[in-house]
Image (cartoon, grey):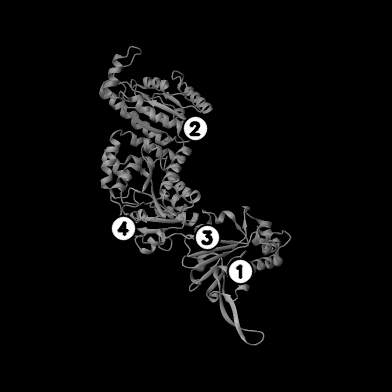
Amino acid sequence: MPTPTQAKPKIVGLYGVPASGKSFLLQQLRSRLRGLCPANRELYRERAIKSIADQCASTGQLGIVSGHFSFWTEKNPRPNNVYTPADLNVYTHIICLDTSAYDVAQRCLKDQDRARPPASTAHIRVWKDYEKTNLRRLCREHGIVFTVFHPTDTLVDDVLPFMHDIRLHSEAKNLARVTQQLDQTLAMMSDDTDIETLLVFDADKTLCDIDTGTLFWAKSGANTEGECPLKTLFSSSMGYSYASFCQAAFLYEEHGWEFGFLCDEVAPQVIVHPEFVVVLCAVEDNKHVGAVVATCGLRRVWEKILQREGLCHIRVLGGGHIADGYVVTPKVKAAVVSRAREHHGLHVCAFGNSPKDLPMLKLANDAIVVVGMEHSRSKSMDTALLIGIDAYGLQARQALVPSSASPRLTVDKLPLVDITHQDFIQSIFSRHRRLRVLHATDKNAAKLLMTPTRDTAVAGPDLRRAHHRVGLYLATEYVSEILGLEKHDIRHVQGHMVDGHQLMEESRTAIVALMRGGEPTAFGISEAFPRAMFIHCNFSDDLDEKLKGIRTVYVRGFAGIRIVVVAGVVQKKAITCSGALEQLSGDADDLSLVSRISNNKFTARGGTDTGHRLFNTTHLD
């Protein structure tokens, strides 16, 4: 598991009351680990810690420093804190040795090398609790990962995996490990299938109505002052940062061998919503759909839950233990969706319930917000959803699980979807159509027609006429091939009736001009198909009422309508697996593109903006 930040050198502080065994552990670690900064703890503390930080920063080595947090003789009513602000600024991790009070007292009495003031075991217990409580609090406030070790005969062997993990891993490596796990999972799915769609599920409060982390800590008896340690952690200044999830994993590590036992106790108490069991069971029988659970919670718990439900084919991407090799953060979830779409070319449907899931939901082709009962669901999700929808263009639907739950926001803002309905099931398990592209990029006719549209000397009416001709050509040459023609009677010049041809269902076709730059091209299309309806449109919402009864629409529309996008030029990335048009094709019954394809990623402004050039308004930008 990685360090909280890549910017700071990695420096671990060893803490504990005097005679806890810090110096002994440090000597053992130096003999077992290579590449440690040679810290001299006898230097003045403030200067020493800064010097060590400089050394580690310049060499890239791991620093391990034995430090003191406080001194407290039994005759004094309160401890004397000796930690410095420099300590809190430099350390990335702190390990506290929680040696038994009896052992500390005995070592103080028997130490012949240094004079240690005697102390009762009762006083040492109070002192230890004071240091652990305040170290844990200060580490949360300063973004330092903190953990406690109970010294045993195998202390060095217990600590070494932590040191290796701290030294070798970073946030970037953490993401690389998750990506590798996803790639391997998808490779196994694709051995004898052709995966086109990936379902990505959050776990706690999405697949069930329980937070398994909260249940784990309730069973462990470690809740302090009635509050779950995870709630204390995530509500601190660390928030849901990468360092915070590293800290959560270190908290779980403090349970040692009890960790697995507690996971085994938690899993049987979690009931997966039957609605999701149906969907996940169907995945096993479908060769074109796969599913993974991406959870910020405990992988081991969710593997046991899925195994009990007969869903062993569902892979869990989750952490909670150093042995897992990574932690899952909201950013990691988003990266899973992005990787599946952009690298593997999959259509991704993501399910989540809380603000932590929004980065993942924003990147999915289909985003489903799972809404539970009011008393148990996230209180901050409504506000986060509003921001996501209004400010960042999130397009999502909400699934009420159970169906008696009240909706979030309004159904206009966040439309309802019944995940048990056949229409939804079919939309997931039916094979997704790919974008059909017909382009005239290399045609001589296209080269001639496009020349004036790219000529900086052509603007205003002349440019509008050029775009009109492009629209007429693309409609006549390509759209007629895509949609087909139908016969109708016309009177021949010699007076008798003959077969004429027009676009199939031309009178039920709408030409939508995306204003204002799309109007001249749309007029060219209209000349080719004179019986088609012509609609001016600024936003897709404008089409809701205007498209009733329409069979074909040019430019952009909705599921259930046949769509042909006609454009003078389209950037190549728009038609890749993760491109905007390819995304739209997954939702449309039939989507085709007619255009010239360009590799140019230039964003036009002022004199280079087509809309301004068409109407001689370049000076307004």
The image shows residue 266 at horizontal and vertical percentages of 27, 43
- 323 vs 387, left or right, is left
The residue wearing badge 2 is: 8
Please name the amino acid that badge 4 sits on: Pro
Q: Earlier in the sequence, mark 2 or mark 1?
A: 2
Q: Quadrant of residue 478?
A: bottom right
Q: Please name the amino acid that badge 1 sits on.
A: Ala
Q: Earlier in the sequence, mark 3 or mark 4?
A: 4
445 over 207 or under it: above or below: below
Rendered image: mark on residue 402: 4
Q: Position of residue 152 (x, y in %)?
A: 30, 25
CA separation, marks 2 and 4? 46 Å
198 or 313: nearer the viewer:
313
* Amino acid type at mark 2: Lys
Q: Which mark is residue 475?
A: 1
| Residue 408 appearing in the image | no
- Judge the density around disc 2: few (<14), some (14-19), many (≥20) Cα neighbours within 10 Å: some
